Image (spheres, helix red, strand yellow):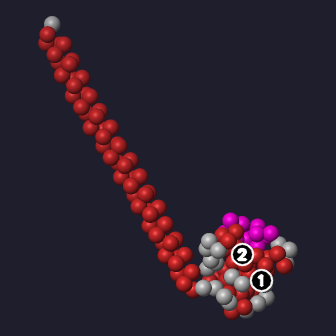
Amino acid sequence: MNFNDRLVELRKRKGLSQEQIGYELGVSRQTVSKWELGQSYPDFQRLVLLSDYYEMSLDELVRGIDVGDVRVLNESEKRISSIYSDVEKGKAMLGSAWKAFLAIGCVILVFFAAIVSYGVFFVR
Protein backbone atom coordinates (compact mmCIF):
# COMPACT_ATOMS: atom_id res chain seq x y z
CA MET A 1 0.00 0.00 0.00
CA ASN A 2 1.29 3.47 -0.88
CA PHE A 3 1.89 6.06 1.80
CA ASN A 4 -0.89 8.31 0.51
CA ASP A 5 -3.34 5.40 0.50
CA ARG A 6 -2.25 4.51 4.03
CA LEU A 7 -3.01 8.08 5.17
CA VAL A 8 -6.50 7.92 3.65
CA GLU A 9 -7.17 4.54 5.26
CA LEU A 10 -5.95 5.64 8.69
CA ARG A 11 -8.00 8.84 8.58
CA LYS A 12 -11.16 7.06 7.46
CA ARG A 13 -10.67 4.29 10.02
CA LYS A 14 -10.90 6.96 12.72
CA GLY A 15 -13.88 8.55 10.95
CA LEU A 16 -12.17 11.91 10.54
CA SER A 17 -12.28 14.52 7.81
CA GLN A 18 -9.21 16.01 6.16
CA GLU A 19 -10.01 19.24 7.94
CA GLN A 20 -10.03 17.54 11.34
CA ILE A 21 -6.66 15.87 10.72
CA GLY A 22 -5.28 19.17 9.42
CA TYR A 23 -6.42 20.91 12.59
CA GLU A 24 -4.74 18.27 14.75
CA LEU A 25 -1.47 18.64 12.83
CA GLY A 26 -1.55 22.41 12.36
CA VAL A 27 -1.91 22.31 8.56
CA SER A 28 -4.70 23.12 6.14
CA ARG A 29 -7.21 20.68 4.70
CA GLN A 30 -5.60 21.28 1.30
CA THR A 31 -2.24 20.14 2.64
CA VAL A 32 -3.78 16.90 3.95
CA SER A 33 -5.46 16.45 0.58
CA LYS A 34 -2.12 16.81 -1.22
CA TRP A 35 -0.59 14.20 1.08
CA GLU A 36 -3.46 11.82 0.40
CA LEU A 37 -3.24 12.37 -3.36
CA GLY A 38 0.51 11.81 -3.32
CA GLN A 39 1.21 15.34 -4.58
CA SER A 40 3.41 16.14 -1.58
CA TYR A 41 4.65 14.56 1.62
CA PRO A 42 4.55 15.71 5.22
CA ASP A 43 7.74 17.12 6.70
CA PHE A 44 9.48 15.16 9.43
CA GLN A 45 7.74 17.02 12.26
CA ARG A 46 4.33 16.21 10.78
CA LEU A 47 5.33 12.57 10.26
CA VAL A 48 6.14 12.32 13.97
CA LEU A 49 2.82 13.96 14.84
CA LEU A 50 0.98 11.57 12.50
CA SER A 51 2.67 8.53 14.01
CA ASP A 52 1.78 9.74 17.51
CA TYR A 53 -1.78 10.57 16.50
CA TYR A 54 -2.34 7.15 14.91
CA GLU A 55 -0.39 5.46 17.73
CA MET A 56 2.08 3.72 15.45
CA SER A 57 5.80 3.86 14.86
CA LEU A 58 7.27 5.99 12.13
CA ASP A 59 8.37 2.79 10.43
CA GLU A 60 4.81 1.47 10.36
CA LEU A 61 3.52 4.80 9.10
CA VAL A 62 5.99 5.34 6.27
CA ARG A 63 6.73 1.76 5.25
CA GLY A 64 6.40 1.47 1.51
CA ILE A 65 7.32 5.07 0.67
CA ASP A 66 9.50 5.15 -2.41
CA VAL A 67 12.37 7.46 -1.46
CA GLY A 68 13.03 8.09 -5.15
CA ASP A 69 9.51 9.45 -5.58
CA VAL A 70 10.01 11.77 -2.62
CA ARG A 71 13.29 13.05 -4.09
CA VAL A 72 11.72 13.62 -7.52
CA LEU A 73 8.80 15.46 -5.94
CA ASN A 74 11.14 17.64 -3.87
CA GLU A 75 13.20 18.49 -6.97
CA SER A 76 10.01 19.37 -8.85
CA GLU A 77 8.90 21.64 -6.02
CA LYS A 78 12.32 23.34 -6.03
CA ARG A 79 12.08 23.91 -9.79
CA ILE A 80 8.56 25.31 -9.48
CA SER A 81 9.70 27.58 -6.66
CA SER A 82 12.63 28.75 -8.80
CA ILE A 83 10.35 29.44 -11.75
CA TYR A 84 7.95 31.38 -9.51
CA SER A 85 10.86 33.40 -8.16
CA ASP A 86 12.05 34.16 -11.70
CA VAL A 87 8.55 35.26 -12.72
CA GLU A 88 8.36 37.58 -9.71
CA LYS A 89 11.75 39.08 -10.58
CA GLY A 90 10.60 39.54 -14.17
CA LYS A 91 7.44 41.30 -13.00
CA ALA A 92 9.54 43.64 -10.84
CA MET A 93 11.88 44.41 -13.73
CA LEU A 94 8.94 45.01 -16.07
CA GLY A 95 7.41 47.38 -13.52
CA SER A 96 10.69 49.29 -13.28
CA ALA A 97 11.01 49.42 -17.06
CA TRP A 98 7.43 50.66 -17.38
CA LYS A 99 8.07 53.44 -14.85
CA ALA A 100 11.24 54.46 -16.67
CA PHE A 101 9.37 54.47 -19.99
CA LEU A 102 6.66 56.71 -18.50
CA ALA A 103 9.24 59.08 -17.01
CA ILE A 104 11.11 59.38 -20.31
CA GLY A 105 7.80 59.87 -22.14
CA CYS A 106 6.85 62.67 -19.77
CA VAL A 107 10.21 64.38 -20.26
CA ILE A 108 9.84 64.17 -24.04
CA LEU A 109 6.28 65.47 -23.83
CA VAL A 110 7.40 68.43 -21.70
CA PHE A 111 10.27 69.08 -24.11
CA PHE A 112 7.94 69.19 -27.14
CA ALA A 113 5.42 71.31 -25.23
CA ALA A 114 8.23 73.77 -24.46
CA ILE A 115 9.29 73.88 -28.13
CA VAL A 116 5.72 74.50 -29.25
CA SER A 117 5.21 77.16 -26.56
CA TYR A 118 8.50 78.80 -27.44
CA GLY A 119 7.60 78.81 -31.14
CA VAL A 120 4.12 80.24 -30.50
CA PHE A 121 5.57 82.88 -28.17
CA PHE A 122 8.13 84.16 -30.70
CA VAL A 123 6.03 83.81 -33.84
CA ARG A 124 3.75 86.62 -32.75
Q: Amino acid at mark 2?
A: Leu
In the rendering, which numbered label is found on residue 25?
A: 2
Q: What residue is rendered at 52% in x and 78% in y?
A: 72
- Judge by depth and name the residue closer to the eye, 45 or 54: 54
Write down the quadrant of residue 33 in the picture. Answer: bottom right
Which residue lies under the disc numbered 1? 53
How many numbered dots are placed on residues in this image? 2
Q: Are marks 2 and 1 in contact (CB under 8 Å)?
A: yes
Q: Amino acid at mark 1?
A: Tyr
- Vertical comparison of 89 with 56: above or below: above
In this picture, residue 5 sits left or right of residue 65:
right
Range shown magenta: 17-32
Write down the quadrant of residue 26 in the picture. Answer: bottom right
What kind of element bears circle 1? helix
Residue 3 at x, y percent in the picture: 68, 82
Q: Residues within 10 Å of mark 1 (few under 14, many from 20)?
A: few
Query: For the view shown, which residue lies furthest in the top direction?
Result: 124
Give the quarter of the figure containing the C terminus.
Answer: top left
Give the quarter of the figure containing the N terminus.
Answer: bottom right
Residue 79 at x, y percent in the picture: 46, 69
